[in-house]
Amino acid sequence: MYELRHLATLIAVADHGTFGRAATALGYAQSSVSQQIAALERTAGGPLFDRPGGPRPVQLTPLGVVVLDHGRELLGRARAMTDAVERFRAGDGRIDIGTFQTATNLLLPPLIRELRDAHPGCDIRLLEEETDVPDLSELDLMFFDGPGDDDVERLKLAEDPHVLVARPGDFEAGTVRLRQLDGLPLVAHPAICDQARVEAALDAEGIRPRFVFRTVGNEALLAMVRAGLGAAVMPRLAVTDDQDLSIHPLEPGLPAREIYLLWQAGRTHSPLAAHAIAIARRGALTAAPRQATSTASS
Amino acid sequence: MYELRHLATLIAVADHGTFGRAATALGYAQSSVSQQIAALERTAGGPLFDRPGGPRPVQLTPLGVVVLDHGRELLGRARAMTDAVERFRAGDGRIDIGTFQTATNLLLPPLIRELRDAHPGCDIRLLEEETDVPDLSELDLMFFDGPGDDDVERLKLAEDPHVLVARPGDFEAGTVRLRQLDGLPLVAHPAICDQARVEAALDAEGIRPRFVFRTVGNEALLAMVRAGLGAAVMPRLAVTDDQDLSIHPLEPGLPAREIYLLWQAGRTHSPLAAHAIAIARRGALTAAPRQATSTASS
DNA sequence: CAAGTCTATCGCTTAACATGATCGATAGGA
DNA sequence: TCCTATCGATCATGTTAAGCGATAGACTTG
């Protein structure tokens, strides 16, 4: 098998014309260059240089030209590889983050900003996927509304209580009794993830709302509420405050949605992922409900 | 610097899942694979695999993915290089042959046919260049109308006497006295190479023809002769026999054009070039004047 | 808790590498 | 023709790296 070091020597000899000058340029002794070229000629199966003898420079044989051309190519690739590794180690790599709507809107932006400030050339990929089981095999990091499996490390980012969202006037201001939801027309997320837990909790209390519409979009749900299709039980952080909506705590409270950052335990992380975890651990990722902009509420 | 052998091991480990199986596949001991990966991790500057311990397979780290991707690329190139060298050594390489009109027409075809028969994939390049000094630096082989410099090897392929070409009837059939050319209107090649020697020989005899037209094309010269512009003194092999032309030996004879095959002395030749030289040495390259085709003469 | 399956490490041997000195070959100038 | 400078090949020597087998340590599984 060819060796990159030998090819580098070949290139130096071809560039400098003589073994001695190439040796000087590479920091070798002349005899080393002789041996390296000899070894290369052994693997190539024939002479790569004609040695005219005397003070004349060596000259590439046709076979030498073939090997030289490929050698330059190969060494260029090797250099590119070294560069790529360096860039990766410097942090200008790639990070795959799994997320979901609320996290995307409220938790992710400060993380992204800090990562991009520290690593301007980095490649941040977001995968928004609503799933019951967190799959970290293709991700470095994942925002998830639950603690995940046992074999992941986790950091709780927020406790997000469920609230009743309705049109102003449909309910008295302030707390609403959970019992009042029984038979009530509701719009809701599909019954997976957090929503599944909510419905299980309601079911355990014997409370059965009528789900008249389901969709994955938070804003779409809120629009349905405004349109009078029904009320909604949603995590507080999923609700954008709005004059056309009234928000009621529930009593007794449903189990809050827990938002975690998950990553695979015992796995070596890329510098980017390690940095992101450090940022999260520092407590830089907090969430507050969003206010509708003044232009939208006017 | 990275080593191709280490990268090959990296790939094997990534493909087989464990160090041990990779070692078996590569014919190494397991400890060697451990050491190679360790060395690779040292040069890469970080771990390439996570070792979960126990009977679970190792898993690439993000850095490992970077190195693996580049490693596959690099090893592919190395394999391509090995292939190219093999193909070259097998003879399916490239050969650059310098030539000129007569050689192209009369001497080259059998050579080309034999080379292509023996090495179907080869790349034969012809460079037709009229020059006084043979330049073999970019060529493997060169047809030339002279023996060339001292530092080339040569093989004489033909002695090509100069003849007078005229319109039938302009001269008596048979030999023409050289003296008759004095003052005669002639068409001729440019005064380089063989033509220069011819004119020098005429000049030494005190014979001064009038050169009324010069061009490099043999056929063009013959056409001029047919058109009555003048006669031509040309090497016999450059003349295509034709009913509209009469060919006269000259007396006393001018020095014949000598056609040599030249190649650089002491140089390592590609298998193709070596084969070509062998063919020439065998005496397979001979020339006879061309006859005009019956269709053309009818 | 024992068995099985991994990787890491240690001691050892061997091959490869780098070095400096020396030799033979050749071109160019005196 | 001789001398000198330059160049590559080769040899002896010390050092590094690579291979191997054996074994220890870590972990999962039954």
Image (cartoon, coloured by chain):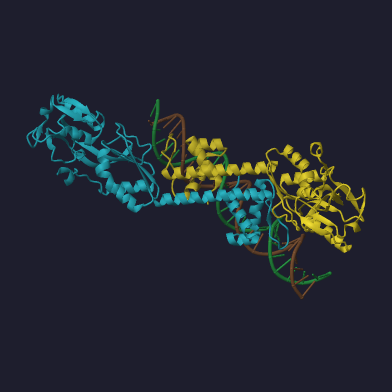
Chain colours: A cyan, B yellow, C brown, D green
- Left or right of residue B275, residue B39 in this image: left
Which picture quadrant has residue A197? top left
The structure residue drawn at horizontal position 20% and vertical position 40%, both measured from the top left corner, is A237
Query: Residue at image x 20%, y 30%?
Result: A188
Residue B172, given in percent of the width and then of the height, sits at 92, 49
Task: Say which of B116 and B192 sits in front.
Answer: B192
Left or right position of B273 against D14: right
Q: Reply above or below: B171 against B92.
A: below
Q: Position of residue A21 (x, y in %)?
A: 63, 62
Residue sitting at 62 percent across and 43 percent down?
B82
Closest to the observer, A241 or D2? A241
- Where the N terminus of chain A falls, by quadrant? top right
User: Considering the image in quadrants, where does the C terminus of chain A appear?
Assistant: top left
Residue B110 seen in the figure: yes
Measured as percent of width and height from the top left, residue A181 is found at: 13, 28
Can residue B146 be seen? no
Task: Report x, y in % for residue B159.
Answer: 86, 50
> Looking at this rendering, what residue extends furthest in the left direction?
A172
Location of residue A154 (image quadrant): top left
